Image: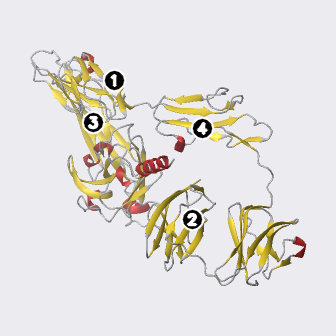
Amino acid sequence: MKKFLIIATLLAIAVFASAYTSRNFWIELQLDQLDIMNYVDTAFPGHDADFVLSVTDGIDVISTETHDPVVIKVTVNAGPNGPVAWATFTAAGFSTPGYSWNKTFTITITYPGNTDPETNSATMSYTTAASGNAAIWLYGDNAWQLPDSIILGAAAPTTTYTLNIAINDDVLTTPGTYTINGQPYQAQLVDDNDEVNDLIGTYTISDAPEGFYWLVNPIVVSATDFDPETNIANITFVLAANPVIDTWTYKLMLTASDGGAYNFTGPVSGVTGTECISDPLTEPINPFIGTFTVTSPPPEGFLWVNTEVTLVGGDFLGAKADHVFAATKQFELQLTPITYTLNIVFPDGYTITGPGGPFTTSPAVVTDNDDTVNDLIGNVYTASDAPAGFHWITNPITVVAEMFTGNAATITFALEQDEEPPVPVELSSFTATLTGQFYVQLSWTTQTETQMVGYRVYRSTTADQSTIELIDNPLVPATNTSTTQNYTVVDKDVLIGQTYYYWLEAVDYNNSNFHGPVSVTVTGNVPPVLPEATEMKNAYPNPFKANSSTNIEVSLKEGDSGTLSIYNVQGQLVKIVSLTEGTHMVNWNGRDTRGNVCGSGIYFYKLSTQSMNQTKKMVIVK
């Protein structure tokens, strides 16, 4: 049991100490009409203080106001076309444990220079693919287009944008009829709805006539294509006759779904993610036609969905004008399915109902093996009625993750006999002993108390209860708890040489009961017998349950003194008791010096005196 508790603790620490797997996100920032480079001027790796950036995964939040710029920042760094503004963060900055796959991140950027909270912020969301830890780059057409109002506020003007589209097909005898992005050709497109330039995008013209090709198709229109004074942009599709081509070039890109690099063999061998390019060929004979096989093993916890891909001629697409043809195929990875097993143990003759049931034969087995998610967690199983005089210790039982060791768990339905109605007090001991001062000490221990008022102690010089009298001590109040309690009363009104008999009256709300007698003889001024050696005996009981107690007997020889200290497994002091010479029974109720209940686990008790130091172990269980 102790080994299981240690292993479970270590596993829990390992799981929750881990955050997302490392993954970087780079998002290019653009404004509709304004040049954002007029507002961002801090170079990578610092953070531009003019902007506040925060990102949430729905559980945790990282922000430039609370995290180091290594984790999250707005900065200037080189892009494909020169320096641009970026919003960047790393998923490893979150404390949420797990993978950064198939996760949605919500990104908010705020420009505090605009004090209007209605306009000074913009928000976008991005959901990652199902697998892979490669960096995410969103730029160019995929850049984050911020409204000018984030800088200018509600006063940001709306603008009319115009895109003129020309077609130069004068190489044809008769002009053709074309479509742009699947719609009938229009020479001019206008957007005047708001401050967002909806004309930014990609424009594709329909196929060129046979024997001809478009010099550029499609044409990408960006914000920089619009004249800043007129807000007009111009594009032209130019038709040209096919040149005489006498060579063919083929390109092949084989990838893995997680973006990793893996070896493959086939008509050519290589590594996924690396483009294979043929030499210019004088005949259209494609060297990449055939079957390719991935030879690298999958990462731990994954399997290949397909280890082979086959390329045919139709997979290669290209422009007729230059006879360059390219194809892309992918080897797919998926998480390895895990089989989870639940064993249900119960006595013969009973029925257990729940998912996968009902079950009438023990042990019953329920499995889940369709994916990597343990769908058995949350299942609820209920036993049929218990017989008269008995009850189920736990019924129903809900399956939780902590029940699983590895991929298997066991739940047990056990019967227990019903308890007798509780008595007001369960007394385990009542003793009378002579103290070193020649007084009589009356001690009693209760295991449970219910509806108790308190206790009175009576005395007589004979064993006849009719002669008893109440000693000079008030009613001792009861604690009314279900845990062990110890009580002590000292009778100082005694004479040397006399034998005394004592009774204990336990008073509850309805009546009272007497216990005893116990007797003791006051023997005179005889010094107590001290132990010959200092020693500490084993705690009993050990282990003991939480909210109960254990006893530790300690003997200190003449002239010896010291302390009995109790520590937890972190070495923190929980309880300390000072001791002098003599024999002591130290009772520990499982609470610290402030009265707080100590949790289940391993504890150490240490005796420290002038003559010895000794440490032993004890365990509190649930």
Q: Position of residue 99 (x, y in %)?
A: 39, 43
> Element under label 1?
loop
Residue assigned mark 3: 260
The front one of 245 and 585 is 585
Q: In the picture, residue 523 is in which quadrant?
A: bottom right
Disc 3 vs disc 2: which is toward the camera?
A: 2
Q: Give the Cα distance between marks 4 and 1.
A: 39 Å
Task: Point out the tag, 1 or 3, that comes first from the N-terminus.
Answer: 3
Please say if the residues under marks 4 and 2 sit with CB atoms less than 8 Å apart.
no
Q: Residue at x 33, y 35 (%)?
A: 300
| Between 193 and 393, the one nearer to me in the picture | 393
Q: Residues within 10 Å of mark 1 (few under 14, many from 20)?
A: few
Residue occupied by mark 1: 306
Q: Which mark is residue 552?
A: 2
Residue type indicated by callout 1? Asn
Q: Is residue 233 left or right of residue 393?
A: left
The kind of residue tagged 3 is: Gly
Q: Residue at x 75, y 70 (%)?
A: 478
Find out whether the residues at labels 1 and 3 contact each other: C-beta distance under 8 Å: no
Q: Secondary structure at mark 2?
A: strand
**Can you tell which of label 4 and label 2 is closer to the viewer?**
2
Residue 495, image quadrant: bottom right
The disc, 4 or 2, on the residue closer to the chain's N-terminal end is 4
Point out the frontmost of discs 1 and 2: 2
User: What label does residue 267 carry, if any?
Assistant: none
Query: Is 343 in front, or is 440?
Result: 440
Q: Amino acid at mark 2?
A: Ile
Residue annotated with mark 4? 411
Mark 4 or mark 1: whose residue is earlier in sequence:
1
Give coordinates of residue 508: x percent, y percent.
83, 66
Residue 538 visible to an observer of this rendering: yes
